[in-house]
Image (cartoon, rainbow, N blue to C red):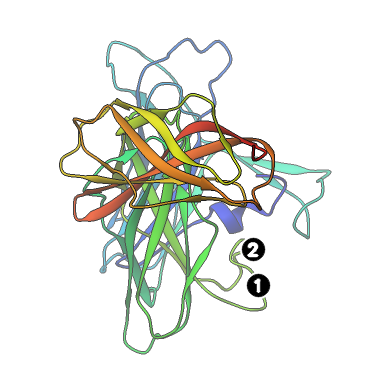
Amino acid sequence: NDWMECPRTSSLAVPQGNRWTVNVSLLPGQGNTYRGELNIVAHGLPEGVRSVSPTVPSGAKLWPVQFVADQLASLGGALITLEATPVDSSHMIESRSQQNIPFINHPGGDAWRTVRLDCFVLGVTEPAPFTIDVTPPSVPLVRGGELTIPVKISRHEGFNQPVQFRCDWRPPGIGVPPNETIPSGQSEAVLRISAQAGAPLGVSPLVVVASTVREDFSDYVGTGHVRVSSEIVNLTIAESYVELTSQPESIRRGQRKQFVWTVHHKSPFEGKARVKLVGLPKGVNLVGPLPILTKHLKEIAFQVEATNEALLGRVGGLSCEVVVEAGGQEILQRTGNGTLRIDPKL
């Protein structure tokens, strides 16, 4: 844990009637040959506390484990262990819990001594003044696309402080924003996530955690903060709707012409999608209405115009923003890598 005082960032403090999620490292032991799926099972949980963890896919080195405390769970602590068990019962494996505690008195630096523990401390604490919930996405997040997920804070009576939230666990290839804050008097926000072009396809868990805000200590340090977690929700990563390609194009100053892109349909969509050409250099503008894309079109074209102020030379990295309406929201996808050369006026 980067020689941080790791109990502050990985501790298992679960408020009554609430949730907390921690990311667990899954390191293969020496001589391990098992490559299948795993379940993570918690042992020694106090009464009124349960653990939730989706099936661990083959090869995962980090995975979320959530602990949920009932409202009537007794206050107090317990020593627990986590066990990794194979989904395929024909295999037998051994696993153990381990946590290294460095002896340091400040964040960062190196420790001369550490203590290696073979169990974890879980505590049921007094109720938190708020809960956080995220709405499970009703549509997949496509490769190269963006998706917004509603986030809601339910404030208990008397609590009106700002709340900071972040996406603490997301699948590989998924981009998330830094910490965001819901101000006093507000309870709703959105989490905007994006998928790289090569993000692994399939269903993966997504978790958002929230913390009270203090000016004297950051949330990462942990001291004096109350932290809770959303439920673990499923996020589906799907193939992109379309892939747009173009041949290198040129245009002269003072000229207007079409910039043609070929449409390769990869994941069908209903209705119409808006398309915008982005990355044009200074002095080159889009003219006229933007093209509308349907699942039947094989080609679209943009009208571009180069003014006398257009910078001469070759410009790369032009791309298209495709906006598809699905599941009651707009899904933005970026695609393409076009080139345009600006030549002098004849």
Q: Are marks 2 and 1 in contact (CB under 8 Å)?
A: yes
Residue 170 visible (yes or no): no
The spot of residue 210 in percent (x, y) is 45, 65
The answer to whether 314 appears left or right of 132 in the picture is: right
Amino acid found under the numbered disc labelled 1 = Phe
Q: Residue 107, relative to residue 157: is it above or below?
A: above
Q: Residue furthest front?
A: 346
The spot of residue 318 in percent (x, y) is 53, 38
Amino acid found under the numbered disc labelled 2 = Val
Residue highlighted by disc 1: 217
Q: Secondary structure at mark 2?
A: loop
The spot of residue 115 in percent (x, y) is 69, 43
Closest to the observer, 27 or 126: 27
The answer to whether 332 appears left or right of 136 in the picture is: right
Instruction: Give me the residue at 40% from left, 41% from top.
Output: 302
CA separation in Å, label 2 and label 1: 7 Å
- Which picture quadrant has residue 340? top right
Instruction: Give me the residue at 59% from left, 51% from top.
Output: 307
Q: Residue furthest bottom?
A: 158
Residue highlighted by disc 2: 221
- How packed is label 2: few (under 14 Cα within 10 Å), some, or many (20 or more)? some
